[in-house]
Image (cartoon, helix red, strand yellow):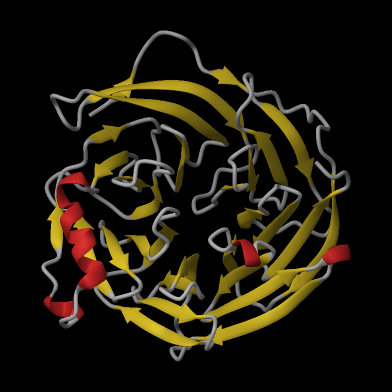
């Protein structure tokens, strides 16, 4: 297992806002009484960059950000099971280019919602416990991965309903998997992290023929030869507690635990011995009062910045690609005191949304155009 190497000390950002960009609250919506766990803009389809969705309780709601801070409700989907509590959602794409919404939560069932018909396109049953995160492959937006409490990550084809690969087993996670992400350019790679305090990097290269087969499969999805990927190519112990969010930044990884910071690090894999290697911690982005688990950060489309909420309802916006790290803005409002479970940055970072434990959605807009 990769341990942190000695050498250069990581560069830690300072919490003095640079005022590079100023934001102000332009809207606040009370969606309901139940906590909102996820919010996401649609980056899959350029026609809908200003469309976002939230999940809370057994409801998935689709909105549009309009000029002047206006938020319009477009659609709402209520799950048939009133005890469902969705924790995560991701935008994906049908063969005809129509946007899909993929949601999962406490029931362990993944719902693929066709936003064109406002009906369920498919339901994926397979995970043995709740689903903590779903992410879409940006290069092939009909492929999604799901991270589950059942200690596994699964790869699904939303077009055909097939579970292609299961990342679990001998070298897999030893506790809940909390987050997963596709590499932005290496189509074979994913990174996952969880309650076993590790981040694992997996490769699908050896199994890619099965991924391709999932697009042309005509038999029942249950008859597909789903493969187990038992060993990751890299295991990192960067954090000493639960790791609840990880994202690729090029070949580097941004990850966070419950210790008030996001860490940027480089995995240094050894080709000859999979699973082993070293970790070079490059930078740290402090986030005060961010010491409860299941708080996720988000980035704009080009990964120029990351926005993260904390348990006091404040948002920190960090410039990612500068060294030392620059705090772009620190956002707070007197009436926003509830933990922010997730943020969503718009395509160019000019709008930041946050969804809170008290069922509110907050919209912040940049006061100067970038």
Taking 136 as reference, is 157 above or below it?
A: below
Residue 164 location, quadrant:
bottom left
Q: Nearer the viewer, residue 179 or 122?
A: 122
Q: Is residue 327 visible?
A: yes
Q: Give how far across and how far down residue 336 sits, in percent.
A: 77, 58
Q: Give how far across and how far down residue 175 sits, in percent.
A: 28, 52
Going by the picture, which residue comes out furthest to the top? 7
Q: Nearer the viewer, residue 123 or 243?
A: 123
How many labels were placed on the picture?
0
Residue at (15% x, 81% y) in the render:
219
Q: Is residue 357 visible?
A: no
Going by the picture, which residue comes out furthest to the bottom? 80
Q: Give how far across and how far down residue 159 sits, in percent.
A: 34, 74
Residue at (64% x, 51% y) in the render:
311
Q: Quadrant of the C terminus?
A: top right
Residue at (29% x, 76% y) in the render:
161
Q: Give how far across and how far down residue 54 sits, in percent.
A: 60, 70
Q: Nearer the viewer, residue 316 or 75?
A: 75
Residue 358 location, quadrant:
bottom right
Taking 294 as reference, is 18 above or below it?
A: above
Residue at (41% x, 61% y) in the render:
132
Q: Quadrant of the N terminus?
A: top left
Task: Determine whether, in the image, residue 125 is placed left or right of residue 305.
Answer: left
Taking 272 as reference, is 175 above or below it?
A: below
Q: Nearer the viewer, residue 318 or 138?
A: 138
């Amino acid at each position: 297992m990769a341990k942190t190497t000695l050498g250069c000390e990581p560069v830690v950002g300072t919490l003095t806002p640079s005022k590079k960009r100023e934001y102000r609250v332009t809207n606040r919506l009370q969606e309901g009484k139940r906590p909102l766990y996820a919010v996401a803009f649609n980056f899959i389809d350029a026609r809908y960059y200003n469309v976002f969705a939230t999940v809370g309780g057994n409801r998935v709601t689709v909105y549009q950000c309009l000029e002047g801070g206006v938020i319009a409700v477009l659609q709402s989907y209520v799950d048939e099971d009133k005890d469902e509590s969705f924790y995560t959602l991701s935008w994906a794409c049908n063969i005809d280019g129509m946007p899909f919404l993929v949601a999962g939560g406490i029931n362990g069932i993944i719902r693929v919602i066709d936003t064109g018909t406002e009906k369920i396109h498919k339901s994926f049953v397979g995970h043995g416990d709740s689903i903590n995160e779903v992410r879409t492959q940006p290069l092939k937006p009909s492929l999604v991965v799901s991270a589950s409490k059942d200690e596994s990550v699964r790869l699904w084809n939303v077009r055909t309903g097939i579970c292609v690969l299961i990342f679990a087993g001998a070298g897999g996670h030893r506790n809940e998997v909390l987050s997963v992400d596709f590499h932005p350019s290496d189509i074979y790679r994913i990174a996952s992290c969880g309650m076993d305090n590790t981040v694992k990097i997996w490769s699908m290269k050896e199994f890619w023929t099965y991924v391709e087969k999932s697009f042309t499969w005509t038999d029942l999805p249950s008859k597909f030869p789903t493969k187990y990927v038992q060993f990751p190519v890299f295991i990192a112990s960067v954090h000493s507690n639960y790791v609840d969010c990880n994202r690729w930044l090029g070949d580097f990884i941004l990850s966070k635990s419950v210790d008030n910071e996001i860490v940027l690090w480089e995995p240094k894999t050894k080709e000859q011995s999979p699973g082993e290697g070293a970790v070079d911690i490059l930078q740290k982005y402090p986030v005060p009062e961010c010491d409860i688990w299941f708080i996720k950060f988000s980035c704009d489309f080009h990964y120029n910045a990351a926005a993260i909420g904390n348990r006091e309802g404040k948002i920190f916006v960090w410039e990612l690609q500068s060294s030392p790290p620059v705090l772009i803005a620190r956002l707070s409002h007197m009436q926003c005191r509830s933990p922010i479970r997730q943020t969503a940055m718009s395509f160019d970072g000019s709008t930041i949304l946050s969804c809170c434990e008290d069922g509110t959605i907050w919209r912040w807009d940049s006061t100067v155009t970038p």
